[in-house]
Image: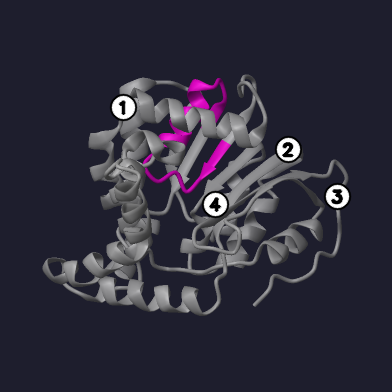
Amino acid sequence: MAGSYHAAEVASAERFEFGANWTRFLAELNDARIAEAESALRDMLEVNDLAGLHFLDAGSGSGLSSLAARRLGASVTSFDYDPLSVRCTRELRRRYFADDPNWKVEEASVLDSASMRGLGQFDVVYSWGVLHHTGAMWQALDHMVSLVAPGGRLFIALYNDQGRASRQWRAVKKAYNRLPHFLRFLVVIPSLVALYWKAAVKDLLSLRPFASFRSENRARGMSVWHDALDWIGGLPFEVARPDDVFDFYRARGFSLARLRTVGGGQGCNEFVFVRATAEVRAPSPPPT
């Protein structure tokens, strides 16, 4: 059912084809990118490995973070709403952990409460740059709560609310998805200039042309080009202020263990929350 809804949203220009973008990214995947993805998990979770832990990748995308978690020793469950993203994740499992019973890959929507309840609970629930693309971000954030075992950790990354700038980017994303594929360069080219001209000038002045765009400089093993397309076309698109996310999860029995913000700028704020071991009742309703 998730696949049919996804196809309808893409056809109506309400959803970017994230899975198609990640399919192209897999051609660039190498050992250095995988190592960087592992390092990013270890760093933010403040661990040396994930041995013996149950790890949920909610919105697995390319599957790279799931692969990193499995290589760090976790038992992994991955799911995504986009059928092509599910296929990407299964491809990485085939390449690196063929027939591994400790890595499950499923197609599901984080907005489907029944599907989420059926997954069980996990020591680490991870969702990097995903929940703001669901079309109902606060509902998706609420569904994360029951997935985290008592004492477990929730690692999420959400687009920062920049006010007017965020509204302008939403208009760009809508324009991109409404255009036929052969005309999308009309949105992509000026967007790339807006995104990267400062970095390009800085590189030239330091006599290191395009140094900022080399693969080894990309956090979590990502790709400049595929990240840019994800940003330019990424619908649905919602944003959140760090204090709103903090208040939301504090009311649900979580404490903030780590926070990395973009300083009011563009991009994702990263949060690691720890769930209390005792139940917290009557949480405040999600923000509207």
User: Is residue 229 shown above or below 85?
Assistant: below
Q: Secondary structure at mark 2?
A: strand
Q: Quadrant of residue 95?
A: top left
Q: Which residues are magenta?
A: 56-76
Q: Earlier in the sequence, mark 3 or mark 2?
A: 2
Q: Position of residue 160 (x, y in %)?
A: 56, 63
Label 2–label 1 contact, CB within 8 A: no
Circle 3: element type: loop
> What percent of the width, then of the height, locates residue 247?
77, 63
**Does the segment drawn in magenta span residue 58?**
yes
- On the image, the x and y values in percent for residue 280 come to 86, 54
* Cα distance in 3D space between marks 4 and 3: 22 Å
Residue in the image at 64% along x and 20% along y: 52
Depth-wise, is mark 4 or mark 1 nearer the camera?
1
Image mark for residue 115: 4
The amino acid beneath tag 2 is: Gly
2 or 4: tag closer to the N-terminus: 4
Report how far apart the C-alphas of labels 2 and 4 lie in the structure: 20 Å
Q: Amino acid at mark 3?
A: Glu
Task: Tell whether 99 sits left or right of 190.
Answer: right
Q: Nearer the viewer, residue 288 or 266?
A: 266
Please give the residue where the numbered disc 2 appears in the rendered image. 152
* Depth order, front residue of 182/228: 228
- Mark closer to the chain start, 4 or 3: 4
- The numbered mark at residue 30 is 1
Which quarter shows the C terminus?
Answer: bottom right
**Upstream in the sequence, badge 2 or badge 1?**
1
Residue at the (72%, 64%) spot, across then down: 243
